[in-house]
């Protein structure tokens, strides 16, 4: 089942969007990305680009079944906003991949804070979420 991303308090963001005083696509973040957010973003990014990834789709084109994303572990997380608008962040972190004996590798990646909206007949949901802009390829020499 599709799970909506967790969001922070949206009252200021919603007010800014309504008044068109902030960028609708990239509103300011309530906080920097967390280790859980980064681990999930990296795992999904890598999974869908793997040649062996082969989900099944229904007649409307929605994914019906797919293998779960790998469980990545993030350590030594350091993020900072890259702009006054606080909608971009650069993060460096240790990334441990499942089954890799070498241990955590040093990674640097950029993230964008984006607005999402899901409207159905019975509900309207909106929020902001950190999205991976780069990939999570470890620095070849970057042991943590």
Image (cartoon, grey):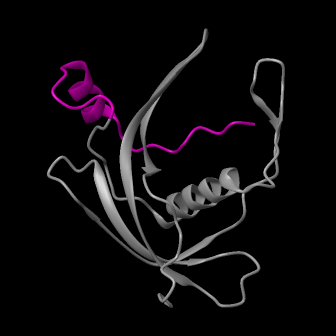
The image position of residue 63, as x and y in percent, is 77, 33
* Count of residue discs: 0
In the depicted structure, whether residue 118 falls above or below residue 131: above
Residue 76 colored in magenta in the image: no
Q: Horizontally, is 18 left or right of 120 in the view? A: left
Image: magenta residue range: 1-25
In the depicted structure, whether residue 120 falls above or below residue 134: above
Q: Of all residues shown, which one is farthest toward the top?
A: 121
Q: Nearer the viewer, residue 51 or 121?
A: 51
- Magenta stretch, main secondary structure, is loop
Q: Horizontally, is 25 left or right of 3 in the view? A: left
Q: Of all residues shown, which one is farthest toward the front?
A: 51
The image position of residue 143, as x and y in percent, is 51, 91
Q: Horizontally, is 50 left or right of 117 in the view? A: right
Q: Quadrant of residue 39?
A: bottom right
Taking the spot 14% from the left edge, 51% from the top edge, the residue there is 84
The image position of residue 82, as x and y in percent, is 22, 59
Image quarter (top left, top right, bottom left or bottom right) of the N terminus: top right
Q: Nearer the viewer, residue 73 or 100?
A: 100
Q: Quadrant of residue 21?
A: top left
Taking the spot 43% from the left edge, 34% from the top edge, the residue there is 127
In the depicted structure, whether residue 3 falls above or below residue 14: below
Q: Horizontally, is 46 left or right of 27 in the view? A: right
Q: Nearer the viewer, residue 59 or 73?
A: 59
Taking the spot 57% from the left edge, 61% from the top edge, the residue there is 42
In the depicted structure, whether residue 90 falls above or below residue 115: below
Residue 18 colored in magenta in the image: yes
């Amino acid at each position: 089942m599709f799970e909506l991303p967790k969001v922070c308090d949206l009252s200021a963001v919603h007010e800014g969007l309504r008044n068109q005083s902030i960028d609708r696509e990239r509103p300011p973040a309530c906080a920097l990305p967390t280790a859980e957010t980064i681990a999930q973003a990296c795992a999904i990014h890598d999974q869908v680009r793997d040649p062996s990834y082969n989900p099944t789709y229904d007649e409307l084109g929605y994914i019906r079944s797919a293998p779960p994303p790998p469980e990545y572990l993030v350590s030594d997380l350091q993020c900072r906003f890259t702009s006054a608008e606080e909608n971009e962040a650069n993060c460096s972190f240790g990334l441990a991949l499942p089954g890799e004996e070498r241990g955590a590798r040093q990674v640097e990646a950029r993230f964008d804070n984006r607005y999402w909206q899901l409207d159905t007949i019975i509900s309207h949901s909106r929020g902001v979420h950190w999205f991976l802009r780069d990939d999570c390829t470890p620095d070849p020499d970057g042991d943590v």
